[in-house]
Image (cartoon, rainbow, N blue to C red):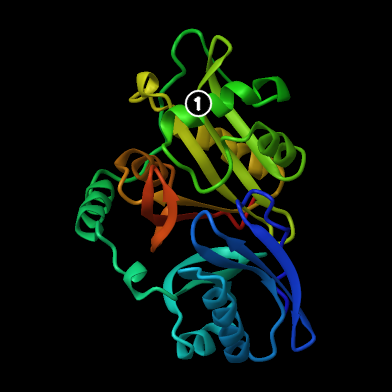
Amino acid sequence: MSNRRQACHACPMKTKKIFFKGLPIEIGLDFTNNRLKVFSYEAAKYSQLAEWIKGIAKEKNLGKILFNSKEDGCLDLESAGFVLEGTIPGFFNGEQAYCYSFFIDPARSLSAYQEEEDQILKDVRGNKAPAKSEAKLPTGYKLREIREGDVESLVSLYKNVFASYPSPLFNPGYIKEVMKRHVYFLAIFDEDVPVSAGSAEMDLINNNAEITDLATQPRARGLGLATMLMEALEKKMRERQINCLYSLCRAGVPGVNRALYKLDYSFQGRLINNCHIGGRFEDMNIWVKWLPNF
């Protein structure tokens, strides 16, 4: 069965298109985040494919494997020791993705922050029912897409907010490249300086988009800017007929989790020690908005 997706140019990794049992597979060797990601595959027997992928990860000393599978692969992946960490409804052109992980390094399967993150999630979902934000942009602020001339100042924003990041947002050339391909960047500007930004990474083959790269300068926090950005990104994706939106959100940061909940995203699981951000490995909550009707 084919799960072909667009090559992930937004990932800080080396992608490889190879063959297993005569069938094509595309994987990413992500040394920044010490993990292997399966991007697309065709498989007659998932159990054999799973063992082969585990062998590659061990050879490359990568601590975690990520595999978004269709339903027909679930039993074989679980038999091979993969753990279901979440789901993304609608990910595969309307079909649900099952987010499986295999931990080459057993220690990586243990979260050091689970209790704190569970409390954050409880607090976020314990508030009143989700509702659209009615916040307005402060006087002098403008929301628009990122242009090539804005890239250097966008990089400065990301460098100021993050000690480390799982994709190469500190590289202006990288941002300019992916802007031309499948990543749509928006920002809120104070005069000509972006104070809050985010993006939608589009998978045009499977008809989904990841809302990601959200960052706000400390001086502009508390104004609801992240919520406004996500509303604007959602509108742009709906215009492009992309109806599965998801976000992998830092589980230990209340603000973005709260903003996603307010915008009617549903919590679908947590990826443990998933990526290196803010100077350490962090758990990521999966939030999904599946919009089957336009």
Q: Nearer the viewer, residue 153 or 232?
A: 153
Instruction: Relative to 30, say whether 294 is above or below.
Output: above
Query: Farthest residue in the right direction?
Result: 22
Residue 142 visible within the image: yes
Q: Relative to 273, does residue 180 appear above or below in the rendering?
A: above
Displayed quadrant of residue 220: top left
The quadrant the N terminus occupies is bottom right
Q: Which residue is mark 1?
A: 157
Choose top left, top right, bottom left or bottom right for residue 258.
top left
Q: Nearer the viewer, residue 225 or 48?
A: 48
Name the spot of residue 174 as percent of width and height, x first.
68, 39
Against 271, residue 161 (above or below) is above
Q: Position of residue 277 (x, y in %)?
A: 42, 46
Residue for point 43% across, 51% down? 276
Judged left or right of residue 1, residue 161 is left
**Residue 288: image location, x then y, percent:** 48, 55
Identify the residue shown where x is 64% and y is 91%: 45
Label 1: few (<14), some (14–19) or many (≥20) C-alpha neighbours in 10 Å: many
Q: Secondary structure at mark 1?
A: helix
The location of residue 151, given as percent across then percent down, is 64, 26
**Amino acid type, callout 1:** Leu
96 vs 83, left or right, is: right
Residue in view at x 25 percent, y 60 percent: 112
**Relative to 133, does residue 69 appear above or below in the rendering?**
below
